[in-house]
Image: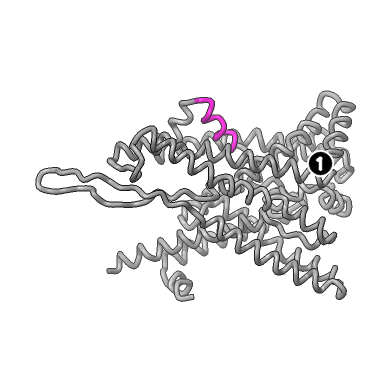
Amino acid sequence: MEKLILLFKTPDLRKKILIIAGILLVTRLFATIPIPGIDAIKLKSFFESNQLLGFLSVFSGGGLSTLSILMLGVSPYITATIIMQLLTMIFPSLKEIYYEQGEIGRAKFNRLSKYITVPLAALQAYGFLNLLASQQVIGHLQLFDVLRNVIIITAGSMFMVWLGDLISEQKLGNGVSLLIFAGIVSQLPKAMQTLFFNYNPGMVPTYIAFLLVSIIVIAGVVFVNEGERKIPISYSKQVRGNRVYGGVSSYLPLKVNQAGVIPIIFAISILLFPQFIAQTSALFSKSFSLQLNGLVNSFLGNPVTYSIFYFILVVIFTYFYTAVTFDPAEISKNLQRSGGFIPGIRPGEPSGAFLKKVINRITLFGAIFLGIIAILPNLTQIFTGIKALTVGGTALLIVVSVALESMKQINSQLVLREYEEL
């Protein structure tokens, strides 16, 4: 509470918070502006029957479920970033840009991601419009109407990316993450309203159990998100002139959940890809599109096969993304260059092999945890039979992770100003 008061007493931090709050308010206002020609009743029933689109609607702050001009949110940008991360494994020049050129390289990497976002947003917009038209959620659109809506939706997505950059410039959290955070939190009043109207006095024990499970899930998310394995690092002494440098001990933190929520987004992208292909193939053959769409819906419509396949994808992509972002060989080389070593392990390749072994072990626990979190809403519905009682594990993971990261950055800003005053 004292830090919160101090936060608003500090003029520049207060200004940054007000800027972020204003940007988030703008996104909520724009998320209420729908595209024309929507059947609200069919739209609601369609999203209730499609788990994947319901998940994406959470990422867009509910904009997709209302077909607003911000219906795609930042999902095309996230997909573009994932594609760029994959390309670093294929093209060494991209890997050099991202890992070896520092801030300038990362800025160039992000700029390339934004270039890819534009065509991705246009393709996703067309795919969703075609899907909704096939389900009679929106009426038949003429060519001009399709082009107009695709341009508006693409512009809305790039507008969200720009707002995310403005938030990131305040250095109180990641802009894209905070936009997703705000979108999830904005859905809480609606969820509480649904739960209130579906209240059944005979199911009080179920409600209590649901509350306890929610608390346990939140505690588990915090525990795993903050969990890390500390690898001790020692630095050899170096004599320069009359001074001795080094000789200190530190540690290398290896997080249990090294990949964050990215593997879940990877898995959702893979699950959505066949549906996306089915809709875009209507440009060439409507009969093939209908057949493929039927096969996809029959597979994803089975909650058991959907949950198993979803879980397996999350586990696989957790290992994959950890391998992309954490290179034990490169870290061991950097330690060796700086005179650091792991006690009891020889520098160089043996240190890299040791780090690889450790990260593979702790990633297993993180991967299983992410997989359970991903399918938690399905498990809740299976055991309770009530759609209103769904513990959104992915949403909780995002909310808790973003809140903790923002708190750390705010705390670091306050500590920095305390030092400046001294």
In this rendering, position of residue 222 left or right of residue 152: left
Indicate how the structure is coloured in the image: one colour
Residue lying farthest to the top in this orientation: 284
Crowd rating for badge 1 (residues with CA inside 10 Å; few <14, some 14–19, many 20+): many
User: In the depicted view, which residue is nearer to us: 149 or 61?
Assistant: 61
Q: Which residue is mark 1?
A: 300
In which quarter of the view is residue 398 placed?
A: bottom right
Spot occupied by residue 237 in the image (x, y as percentages of width and height): 21, 45
Spot occupied by residue 368 in the image (x, y as percentages of width and height): 64, 48
Residue lying farthest to the left in this orientation: 242
Which residue is drawn at the image coordinates 76% and 59% (left, top)? 390
Note whether residue 81 is visible: no
Q: Amino acid at mark 1?
A: Leu
> What kind of element bears circle 1?
helix
Magenta-colored segment: predominant secondary structure? helix
Tell me where the magenta segment starts and ends, as one range.
81-91
Note whether residue 49 is visible: yes
User: In the depicted view, which residue is nearer to us: 366 or 69?
Assistant: 366
Which residue is drawn at the image coordinates 20% and 48% (left, top)? 245
Spot occupied by residue 364 in the image (x, y as percentages of width and height): 58, 45
Spot occupied by residue 19 in the image (x, y as percentages of width and height): 52, 60
In this rendering, position of residue 216 left or right of residue 202: left
User: In the depicted view, which residue is nearer to us: 107 or 231?
Assistant: 231
Residue 228 is inside the magenta segment? no
Which residue is drawn at the image coordinates 71% and 57% (left, top)? 392
How many numbered marks, from 0 up? 1
Which residue is drawn at the image coordinates 83% and 52% (left, top)? 48
